[in-house]
Amino acid sequence: MSDFHCVTGFFERAKEVYSERGARELLTRMLDQLSYQCSERTFGSRIWFRIRAFVNGIRHDTIQEPYEVEYIDPADVQYRSARAQRTDRSRWKDVGRVMGGDWDIESKSPEYAIENGLLYQTIEDHFQRDVPWEETEYVKKSLERLRQGGHEDTWRAVVRSEEDLWERCEQLDELCDRIQTDGYKSKREVFDSQSADPMGYYPRTFKYMLDEVMIDRGRNGEPLLLDGQHRLFIAKVCGAEEIPVLVAVRHREYVGDQ
């Protein structure tokens, strides 16, 4: 997508926010977006990622091509990576690393099973059983937290109000519609087609083209979810046969076997 199309889409969305939610909300969002855009265009550049890969190669065991996107069947991802809760701020720094340890074994417990998670169950209920968003457990709990002023724990703090919550639900509906109509598109395909990203307005940087569902690979090569849960869950319930992923960490035994 060209910068012109990105800017046009941004201003169209700004007009919607102003008309629906007022000047104060628009100003808050614009300030947040300005900070985000500046950060992403600096730390999402190809040069920055090359520097990061070089530094990682000196400090850690890494693979030769850390930013190569792979394709997997979303049905094969059954567990979250146990590393996920410990790596929220360093997931991108870990891309390409090779690690030993038992984190992959720890991941294969009921605690990390995707099907046991409330968000997955909610997405499954909505898209496969036609349960309205407002009747799903995740949305009910999210509304309760928002009304108590606790947006920090609501959809990773992206949702700050009830309006944000319904907007998020609409984004997920649009994403599922696109998958069912056009198939699951990689970020590179979205970039090249100059189409809007249903999940929001993002600067089209080198990082954007890599920002796929992120996984770890255990010692037997099993994919373990690290980031991108909404896209993965919707791909699962909407019947996508293959999705692009970026591998963060590979288990040392898996790399040795290869």
Image: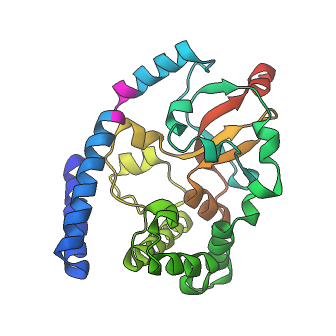
Residue drawn at the location 67% of the way across and 62% of the way down: 236
Is residue 225 visible to the viewer in this orientation of the structure? yes
Q: Position of residue 86 (x, y in %)?
A: 62, 42
Please determine whether, in this image, residue 174 is positioned above or below residue 62: below
Check if residue 46 falls in the magenta segment. Answer: yes
Quadrant where the C terminus sits is top right
Which colour scheme appears in the figure?
Answer: rainbow
Specify the segment rendered in magenta: 43-48
**Rendered image quadrant of residue 26:** bottom left
Direction left: furthest residue? 23
Whether residue 161 is situated above or below residue 208 in the rendered picture = below
- Residue drawn where x is 45% and y is 81% of the image: 147
Q: Main secondary structure of the magenta part?
A: helix
On screen, residue 218 versus residue 233, left or right, reads right
Q: Position of residue 143 (x, y in %)?
A: 50, 80
**Nearer to me, 129 or 239:** 129
Residue depicted at x 62% and y 72%: 123
- Name above or below for residue 147 compared with residue 185: below
- Give the residue at x 24% y 71%: 25
- Of residues 119 and 69, the one nearer the viewer is 119
The image quadrant of residue 128 is bottom right
Q: In the rendered view, does 229 fall on the left or right side of 199? A: right
Q: Is residue 55 magenta?
A: no
Residue 12 at least partly seen: no
Number of numbered discs: 0
Percent across and percent down for residue 200 are 37, 60
- Residue 73: percent from left, percent from top: 70, 50
Check the image and report above or below for 183 versus 141: above
In this view, which residue lies farthest toward the top?
58
In the foreground, 121 or 182: 121
